[in-house]
Amino acid sequence: MNATVGTRTLLPVSLEHHRLLIAPWAALVTALSVSSVLVYPWVFPDPADREGLQQAVAANPAIGLIFGPPGDLMTTDGFNAWRVLALGGFLAAMGAILTVIRATRGQEDSGQAELFASGVLGRSARLLTGVAMALIGGLAVGVLSALLTILCGGGVANTLLLSATFTVTAWMFAGVAAVAAQIGADARTSNTIAISTLGVLFILRGFAYSIEAPAWAIWINPLGWMQETSPSGDNLWWPLALGAAFAAVLLATAFALETRRDFGQGLIKPGPGPDRGRARSPWGLAWRLNRGLALGWTLAFVLLGFVFGYFATSITELISADSPMALALAGGDVSAQALVAAFVVMILSMIGIFAAIPSVQVMLRVRSEEMEDRLEPVLATAVARPRYYAANVALSLALPVAYLAIAGLVVATLTSGSDLGVDFGDVWFQAMTIVPATWTIVAVSVLVVGARPRVAVAAWAGVAASFILTLLGPSFKLPDWALGISPVWHVPDILLPDPDWTGLWWVSLFTLGFVLLGFAGFRRRDLAVE
């Protein structure tokens, strides 16, 4: 009891303070579910359209990697479960992770925890408060999404189970975050550990379903438990008990570990730094601050290259020439060459969108350095604002080049060694042609951080829009003008004769415009303003 004293006072204050951190995740998950129920009858009004969607999704392993196996896409509830279960759970888990880390290690790093400790507050009160906020937030996600989805026409039983998976997923990763908060040297490291765990489990879940892996490969993954509930299918509630028990074990472990670490330190302690700083320029500082992130993502893109390369080598077996997916991918031209080329472009485009994520993180690091009062001492030296910003922008533009080169190398090696009839050089060059489109996605974050940092979440707008339009746009039969909002839609298909480079030139002009506006805004605006 002494360890948790003060929690009853701290919790309502923390909920009020962090409400803007929790609310967007609940709104996103709810919007996904509600939009599925409302849009499905409009986009797929006829049984023939729904059957085409069912076959197209079942035949595309890249879609299955993200959304999981399709159930009954002939019904509104079945479509909602397929589209939202995995992605909604991912978003709910992200919200839980960020809530726990910010309320625990984030306060220690900022000095707020010492201020709290000067009052009557037990050692574990902040951890209990952070966990309680994540658990309440997860429950809110489930309740809000269930109520609004049912009001919009979703089936009661199916929707309640689907929403319950969001809640339990949030609880599981609240436990993961609580453990990571005890291990990491600081808040950023703790976030990296927890989010990396989520990302790895998410990809392994999708890959296991895509290749029809043995049952044990599903059941050793906590996210697989949520998928096995099968909302709108078997409607199994008992796997949720596994998730709740897993969360309880992780939380008990986190509280036990907290008693064994020093305040402000993690169980993994950083080594001593050099006697003198080695970063002699803004360029060196930008690399030093983001080196761990860059190297960690390098390993991730090697893995992505193998995953997507495997899918590419099996395209001829997974999609027959007369399937709806063949028509959707190749625009009606179902020749083997067109089919292979279209699928290779799609998976490389997905890699290109993923390659923008670490670059957006680099730009958001600029904002966090600013808000934590570490930027002004740098600018107090001979470093001008444009030079500092240019160093971070240059790094954010260089990372996609490296990542696409690495993942493209793996994909090209696998595809050229199969019987697809494509050359190593053509596939690798196709990967590199996606770089300008990825730069446009990154340039959105450059614009937001430079000119409108108060809405920093908008830095992810380019990634989110490109991801949704590229993966779901063709299946939803969106018009070309809507698909064209995604920069990767304009990437030429160099695996076919006479590629059209016009769209890529227009995309590059948008990139230039966004970057220039970002520089202009960063040079003129006030720093560290909420």
Image (spheres, grey):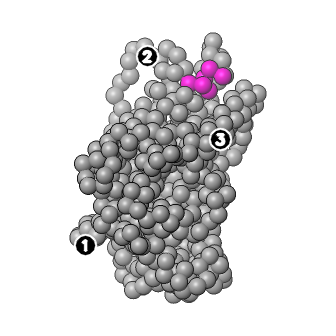
Check disc 1: other Cα within 10 Å, few if <14, some if 14-19, many if 20+: few
Q: Can residue 13 be spotted in the picture?
A: no
Taking depth in this image into account, of 251 and 171 the one nearest to the observer is 171
Depicted 356 relative to depicted 321: above or below: above
Q: Earlier in the sequence, mark 2 or mark 3?
A: 2
Taking depth in this image into account, of 12 and 189 the one nearest to the observer is 189
Q: Residue at x 36, y 70 (%)?
A: 320
Mark 3: amino acid: Trp
Magenta span: 386-391
Which secondary structure, mark 2? loop
Which label sits on residue 215?
Answer: 1
- Measuring from the top left, give residue 495's x and y in whole percent: 42, 48
Q: Residue at x 59, y 74 (%)?
A: 36
Taking depth in this image into account, of 156 and 351 the one nearest to the observer is 351
Mark 2: amino acid: Arg
What residue is shown with label 2?
A: 278
Taking depth in this image into account, of 524 and 333 the one nearest to the observer is 333
What residue is shown with label 3?
A: 506
Q: Residue at x 53, y 34 (%)?
A: 396
Q: Is residue 390 magenta?
A: yes
- Measuring from the top left, give residue 105's x and y in whole percent: 48, 44
- In this view, the mark in front (3 or 1): 3
Depicted 19 relative to depicted 323: above or below: above
C-alpha gap between disc 2 and disc 1: 51 Å
Mark 1: amino acid: Ala
Which secondary structure, mark 3? helix
Q: Earlier in the sequence, mark 3 or mark 1?
A: 1
Check disc 3: other Cα within 10 Å, few if <14, some if 14-19, many if 20+: few
Which secondary structure, mark 1? helix
Check disc 2: other Cα within 10 Å, few if <14, some if 14-19, many if 20+: few
